[in-house]
Amino acid sequence: MIASLSGRVAHIDENGLTLEISGVGLRVSVPLPLLQETQVGQSLFVHTHMVVRENELSLYGFPSLEARQLFTLLLSVDRVGPRLALAILSKLSPGALRSAVLGGDSSLIAKVPGVGAKTAQKILLQLADKVQPGEGDAIAWERQTSDSDLLAALTGLGYSVVEAQTALQSLPEDAPDDLEEKLKLALRYFGR
């Protein structure tokens, strides 16, 4: 596995760049913000993730370990491939993505081209237990942990992720922290 690369930027196009390392040019797809701040001829270090498929080897590069870890987590979500994961990290910084997941904000993720409402909900649901809070995210993390338990309970009762998220959003701001009480309020939403 190629974990990182360091070399001179030999070429840049709209989809990535070519890093020249000891006379060998390696094609690396990178998030748009990194692509925009990079210039031909400059030295560049990236943390990489290699994707191996039947007919293709692809390298994806990131400016930080956090970005690479989030990319790997996004790949674990059903129907999120490397191109969509890269598109998400091109539009959302690692901190913004982490905050959206911890805060249950699917609308922010759904703004990324190619990500619909259902995919955004899947990302939230499948990454809720995997994304750890950064500095200042403790309150959002506690709320998200509680909300993910409620979402799991509702989907376990047969409601879709979208229905469960809608019921969750209908809860009043002063709803009790107790999971059982929140579940009762959410079920009342469906009883209307």
Image (tube, grey):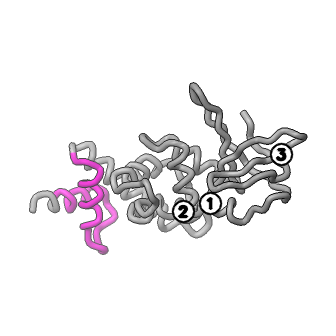
Q: In this view, does 99 lie above or below 46?
A: below
SS majority, magenta: helix
> How far, Cα to Cα, is label 3 from label 1?
20 Å
- Which stretch did the figure color magenta? 159-187
The answer to which of marks 3 and 1 sits earlier in the sequence is 3
Q: Which residue is drawn at 78% across and 62% down?
A: 39
Q: Which residue is drawn at 83% across and 48% down?
A: 6
Q: Do the residues labelled 3 and 1 touch (CB within 8 Å)?
A: no
For mark 1, what is the residue? Answer: 32
For mark 2, what is the residue? Answer: 91
For mark 3, what is the residue? Answer: 20
Q: Percent position (x, y) of residue 182?
A: 26, 60
**Residue lying farthest bottom?**
174
Q: Residue 84 in magenta?
A: no
Q: Are marks 2 and 1 in contact (CB under 8 Å)?
A: yes
Side of 184 where 71 appears, left or right: right
Amino acid type indicated by mark 2: Lys
Side of 160 where 15 appears, left or right: right
Q: In which quarter of the image is the C terminus?
A: bottom left
Q: Which residue is drawn at 30% across and 67% down?
A: 176
The mark tally for this picture is 3
Toward which corner of the image does residue 40 lie, by quadrant?
bottom right
Q: In this view, does 70 lie above or below 139?
A: above
Q: Percent position (x, y) of residue 159?
A: 22, 47
